[in-house]
Image: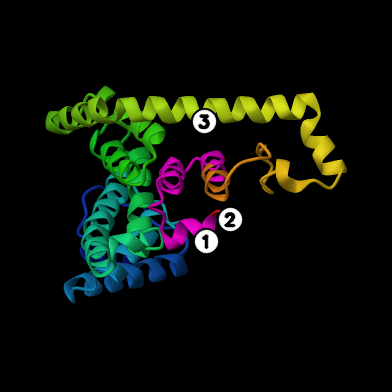
Amino acid sequence: MKSKTASILALAVVAGAWSLPRDARAEDKLTEWVRSAREAEARGQFADAGQQYYFLMNNEFNVPMSYGVKAALGRRAVACLTIAARKEMQSTPSSEGWFHAESLNTLEQAWRNMMKLEPNCPTWPYLLATRECAQGRYVEARTHLNMAIKTTSGQASVRKKAQQLLSHIGVYASKDHARLEAADKAAMEALLSGRFMTNVAGGNQTGSDGSGGWQPESISDSERRARNAEYAGDSGAAARFRSGGTTVQDHSKYW
């Protein structure tokens, strides 16, 4: 009769040695989740399967597992969530934005976790950078592209793509970085000069954005929201406020 550990290995179909669990109840729960994830994937329910693989990858049951098992579960999570995210994006108009696409957001977190598991693999920081570019987060994208380029294992073709994308977005990242530095400098100068406290003490709220950032008094509503987005590190939303191409999510997030 197969042991519980052997059953888990047979269900997971992943590489690497699995350490013997210390908690039989956690082991039973893990077996159940692996089976459930595999069945959901077989039925084509990729969103559910991806979420379950992601849950397992994070080892919520606190069952000792090897690097190989974690990485294999992570790759199954990425594979299923990628399919689910594509379906979500196809069914949602791009004009509405994809900030609330559950599978896409979980997929991004899975990439981040895989980047921690495989720090010398260029694939994960490159994928993160493509997502950040799509959101106009060029400063973050530049950081991840540089990380991808500096890796020494994995596919050289991915490093080449990262280099090409970096050469394309470099100027946008530099502009965003300069704009954010200028905003930080203006906020600090306002704080040190006492203008911020004077406005607060006098009941004048035009000098504050309501979230701790300094705002000059005579600016348009769209510019105020753009600066709020910049303080939050969302350069994509800031650009949309300035160009007039904002989404419903932009207006609900920055007001």
- Labels 3 & 2 near each other (Cβ < 8 A): no
Specify the amino acid type for callout 2: Trp
**Of the pair 198 and 24, the residue shown nearer to us:** 198
Specify the amino acid type for callout 1: Ser
Q: Residues within 10 Å of mark 1 (few under 14, many from 20)?
A: few
Specify the amino acid type for callout 3: Leu
Report which residue position mark 3 lands on.
Answer: 180
Q: CA distance from mark 1 to mark 3?
A: 22 Å
**Of the pair 191 and 129, the residue shown nearer to us:** 191
Report which residue position mark 1 lands on.
Answer: 252
- Labels 2 & 1 near each other (Cβ < 8 A): yes
Left or right: 119, with 216 as reference point: left
**Of the pair 65 and 134, the residue shown nearer to us:** 134
Question: What secondary structure is the magenta-colored segment mainly?
Answer: helix
- Labels 1 & 3 near each other (Cβ < 8 A): no
Q: Tell me the residue at 37%/29% (across/down).
A: 173
In terms of secondary structure, where does tag 2 sit? loop
Q: Residues within 10 Å of mark 2 (few under 14, many from 20)?
A: some
